[in-house]
Every structure is written in structure tokens, then in C-alpha cells.
Image (tube, rainbow, N blue to C red):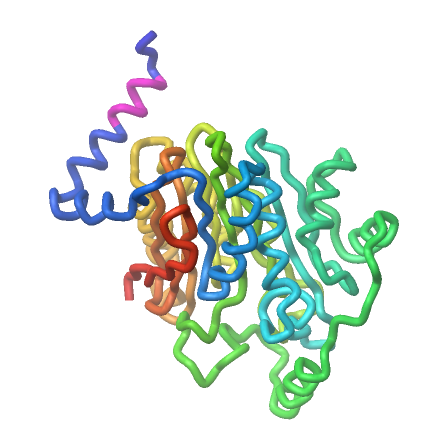
Amino acid sequence: MYNRRKFIQVSAAGASLVALSKSAVAKTLTFTPASTLPIVISTWDFGIAANKEAWKVLEKGGRALDAVEAGVRVPEADMNNHTVGRAGYPDRDGHVTLDACIMDEFGNCGSVAAIEDIAHPISVARLVMEKTPHVMLVGDGATQFAVEQGFKREKLLTPESEKAWKEWLKTAKYSPVINIENKQHAPGNQYNHDTIGMLAIDAKGNISGACTTSGMAFKLHGRVGDSPIIGAGLYVDNEVGGATSTGVGEEVIRNVGSFLVVELMRHGLSPEDACKEAVNRIIKKKPETAKNIQVGFLAINKKGEYGAYAIQEGFSFAVCNADNQDLLIKGKSVY
């Protein structure tokens, strides 16, 4: 039946295509892998190692959900990564607090926020999804649940992170500072990435996603960004595709960014164009703020076509499929 909803979808798709030039359409289509499925994509250069771990699951015909969990556990365990997992920089009071969420092909999702003393928040998030009636657990409650499920409680503040924190305290002002992790570098470049978001489609065509971070360095104690929030840092609709984000989480939350990207793809936009539109909405609402922050979106549709867009240059994403396991692509940006 050609109902009203179908008409809206077709009209929106047609309008978006008219707005694109032939060259822009061709450029977008070059993002379609030669061997589409299975495929896994993730944010930033450390996504390469994460993708390779996820690929071990996908190449054997495994489920996308298992792949994304296994994949993002790699940067969570990386002692040289100070923006994700156990080696993350602490908040302003010296606490290492971690955030993560996960979502499967059935729309099931789980999340933890401001969890402490647990090295792999993504695996706790999955158990929240599978073993509780809830979507999100936070703070002490999340840590308590993790311990009850058999996770080891351990000190996450490493000597290197503690040294960086104490150095920051010498001149610290107790107010939010964007990209404070590496303030000597331009906002949005490769030194400032803070999250790994991963999306995978398995051989059966099912989509799952995961997102995990230690958040903004030296943040206010209790601050939670977009990474553990379904619809903001991550969203999956198995009929359409999935999206994830990186950067200043507050702006992603205000725009329900990942959900927006998926809905734009539902109405016919390519992954890249959907990400671009989401970025432009952030800029439109706060043009002056946007000039000094980074937000990037990464998306994949049901066909396995993928794309990304960011406010600032410097955003990159990794792609892994049967043809190439270590592809790193420079994302497009407004500035």
C-alpha cells in the first residue's frame, strides 16, 4: 500500500537527491566497499586495531553484537590510550570514570555511566542489556552491578595519568575547557579524540554498535557525555543503519545526534550526507561555539555504505572488510 508514510519517505529521498550534484552523488557512492558484508567501521586511528579484533568474529560468521564488544575492548585495555578505558585521564577530583553503551539488531540496549574501578565498561553495559530490565546504570550502582557479575575491581588511575592530572592542577581553573586533554593542539585534530564508536554488519545483514570512553579529561566529577546515551553517542535501527559520534558530548546530546543521523538515512540520505546534516544543525544552533569544538559523526546503512562528517578537520575513521582490514579514511569537515 502506498500510504502517507511511504509518500513522505519517497519525497524526502527525492528532495535530498535533487539537492546533490551528480559529482557529489558519485563521490558519496565511492564509499561503498567492493565486498560489502560483513563489515566493521569505527572512529579514529585506534579503530584499526579494534576493527581487526571485531573482524575475527565477523569472518567466522559471528554475530555483529559479539564483534563490536570484542572490538572496543581493545582500546579499553590499551595502556597508551588516555581517552578510552582503564588508562583514561581522571576528572578534576582524580577519579577515572568510564562510560559505555551497546545496542543490538533487535533494538536491545545497555549502558553504564560514571562507572569506576572496572576496566571494561562495554562488557558491563552488555550485561545491563541482557540481565536487567534497565537500559542504564550509573556511578556506584553500575560498579556494584559489575562486581556482582564477576568483574574485578581495580585501581584505574595509572601513574602516567596521575602525573598528567597533578600537572594540570598547578594552573587549573575549575571550569569546563574544551579539548583540555591536549590544549597545545588545534581543536578536533588527531590528538584530541576521546571516544571509540564502532558499527558492524554481520554476514546475516544484522547491525550492532558499541561506544566507550573515559570522557573529557579533568571534567567536573559526575559529568557524563554522549557516549553512554542511546540516541546521542550511538543508535542502531536494523531496518536502516547505525550511527555513532565523537567529540564534545554536550552538543551531541542537545541534538540527539546519532538518532538524527539514522532518521535522515531512513528518509533517503546517504550516510555521509546524513552525518553532514547533523553537523550543520549543531553549527546552526551555536555557530560561535562550534568554531572551537569538535563533533564528528560516523554512519553505515543497511547496504554497508558508510560515511562520516565532522565540524573540524582531523577526524578519521577505520574500515575493515574482506578486502582490507586496516583502512583509515580522513573524514570530511566543515572547517
Image vertical order of residue 146 relative to residue 32, above or below: below
Relative placement, left or right, of 132 versus 246 is right
Q: Nearer the viewer, residue 316 or 53?
A: 53
Quarter where residue 75 is shown? bottom right
User: Magenta segment range?
Assistant: 5-11
Residue positioned most to the left: 22
Q: Residue at x 15, y 36 (%)?
A: 18
- How many numbered circles are shown? 0
Residue 323 rendering spot, x and y as whole percentages: 36, 49
Q: Residue at x 70, y 39 (%)?
A: 129
Q: Is residue 96 left or right of residue 328?
A: right
Which residue is painted at 41% across and 70% down in the image? 188
Outermost residue toward the bottom?
170
Q: Residue at position x 68%, y 87% from top?
A: 163
Magenta-drawn stretch contains 8: yes
Quadrant into which the C terminus falls = bottom left
Between 44 and 243, the one lying in front of the other is: 44
Q: Residue 237's spot in the image, x, y percent?
A: 49, 33
Q: Say which of 139 and 316 sits in front.
A: 316
Does 75 sit left or right of 3 as displayed?
A: right
Residue 60: percent from the left, percent from the top? 55, 40
